[in-house]
Amino acid sequence: MTTKDRSIYIKNVFYMLVYAFHALNLDQYEDLAGEEFEHMHDLFAAILAKGITRQVKQGLYREYLNRTEDLPTLRGKIELAGTIRNRIARTQRLSCEYDELSENNLYNQVLKTTSMLLLRHGQVADERRSDLRKTMLFFSSVDEIEPASIRWDALRFQRNNVSYRFLLSVCQLVLEGMLITTERGERKLARFVDDQHMERLYEKFILEYYAAECDCAAASSPQVKWALDDGMGTLLPIMQTDVVLRRGNRKLIIDAKYYAHTLQESYGVAKVHSENLYQIFTYVKNREAELADTDHEVSGMLLYAKTDEQMQPDCVYQMSGNQISVKTLDLNREFKEIAAQLDEIARAHFAKEQVAAL
């Protein structure tokens, strides 16, 4: 997706991250909203420099890791096979197995790996590079790891490491959203893969924005059940919604789309992406079937991130008794204007209910 003012767009990525990963109450990041960023990598480096500095002051997270080591005296418990080998070799050492409270754990390894990759990137400003390099002085005992080996689902957050949640979410976006190339034996970040990974951020941002800010409807992202005549749904895909706004018996299913082109071309004529339209229509009709025995109204919306293309969709269709709309969200505006666009979508849809109640 191309943008007119990249600095505004990148600043809005910061706001999207804040909402998407529940960082609304993290005061240490407030001043970043007033800074200008010409490159995405620069924003990520600034976030990590701020967050890691704060984390170092609080103390790096440590957890117990299992170690096996040959020692002159007993520590923990004896590892029998190793001790026997030492005896045979006439080595006066015990093979010991013990738990050690260590900073060299997956959480800190992810922070260091991401930071070191950003430090090698040419689009990180000198000031940010200096700030990030200073934080790495406190990670001398922490190993770098291979990004592809990281099991993100192995990260668990509790009271003593919840402050890592936002930082590691940013790291995941960086490491999964950037191509990692090898030059002269070193890993380097090549470029940001906008469309594939920004779509996931865009979807999560819209859901969490509405969950935090929408005062006219409740926001969630439930699955829609298939309306099956015989109950046999083997091999059918899961229908996972991005956002559902609900007020009383009225529901609006929003499918968020972050594409390079908001419309497709068919024989030289611009059209709505057919597969997107089929998808939202399927969601709406199956959800309606599920509510068939109740008083209800189900509508659907395709909400595209606006591009620089001359023609942008702004359509409302009535299909088989349901409203299906196609709209765009302009991410090149100041964030307060983006928020106003999202607020207006919700207000406009649920306004009819408010009028009817008067």
Image: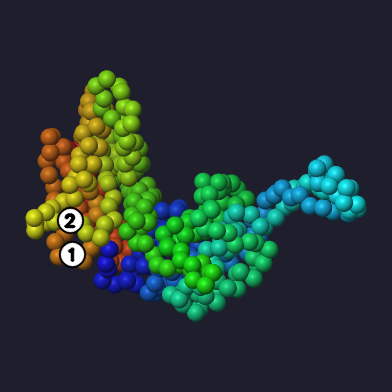
Residue 146, x across and y down, in percent: 55, 58
The circle on residue 309 is 1
Q: Quadrant of residue 79?
A: top right
- Give above or below for 137 relative to 260: below
Judging depth in this view, the residue of 93 and 358 nearest the camera is 93
Q: Say which mark, if any, is on residue 16.
A: none
Residue type beneath disc 1: Glu
| Residue 284 versus residue 88 in the image, above or below | above
Q: Image point 22% across, 46% down: which residue?
A: 276
Query: CA gap, disc 1 to disc 2?
Result: 9 Å
| Image-quadrant location for residue 8 | bottom left
The residue shown at (60%, 58%) is 108
Which residue corresponds to mark 2?
263
Mark 1 and 2 residues: CB-CB less than 8 Å, in contact?
Answer: yes
Residue at the location (35% across, 48% down)?
207
Three-letter amino acid code at the position of disc 2: Leu
Residue beneath the point at 25% across and 37% down: 283
**Tag 1, which secondary structure?**
loop
